[in-house]
Image (tube, rainbow, N blue to C red):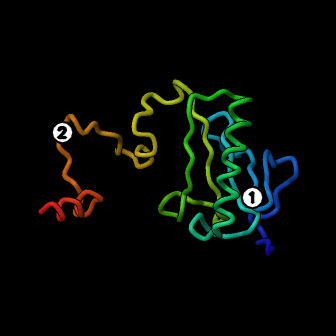
Amino acid sequence: MEKIPGCPFCVPYGDDIVARNRLCYARWDRFPVTKGHLLLIPFRHTPDYFSLTDEEKHAMTELIEECRKIIAENFRPAGYNIGWNIGTAAGQTVMHCHGHFIPRYVGDTDNPKGGVRRVVAGKYYKDPRRRIIPRPAWSPDSEADEERG
């Protein structure tokens, strides 16, 4: 496989690898959000999740399961966030596909409600029972509404 000079993920150090399979590996994040934060990385240099092959996506899913076992046994978190930053607008800084496996702990943030909705500053989960939020022009329900007339 082609290795890109200067890419921090193309040639992992052996002791960086926490878990691996034939197509991808997991390593500790060097700037962890929480204790046990891992990066999930394909060995092949490719820019993002959408450029992975189906086989690589399957390998990533298998690796997530293996990482969950490792983290659960060693750190005992109360939950997890798993996600990919795709493109600079989404915060991707290394243009070699990588996902974040972030263990979550009770008290690690003042209010975890809404999870990934808090990625964008000022955006957070709003309880729909408290106020009416207009539905977008298209939603899965809009087609059903049209069929009902």
Badge 1: residue crowd in 10 Å (few <14, some 14–19, many ≥20): some
Q: Residue at x 18, y 59 (%)?
A: 145
Q: Quadrant of the C terminus?
A: bottom left
Badge 2: residue crowd in 10 Å (few <14, some 14–19, many ≥20): few
What element does badge 2 sit on? loop
Mark 1, residue position: 24
Q: Is 136 in front, or is 27?
A: 136
Q: Which residue occupies the extreme right position in the image?
A: 14
Q: Residue at x 85, y 54 (%)?
A: 13
Q: Residue at x 74, y 68 (%)?
A: 44
Q: Is residue 26 left or right of residue 108?
A: right
Q: Which residue occupies the extreme front position in the image?
A: 148
Give the vertical position of 39 relative to 86 (above or below).
above
Q: Residue at x 70, y 42 (%)?
A: 67
Picture quadrant of residue 71:
top right
Mark 2, residue position: 131
* Residue 60 x/y as whole percent: 67, 56
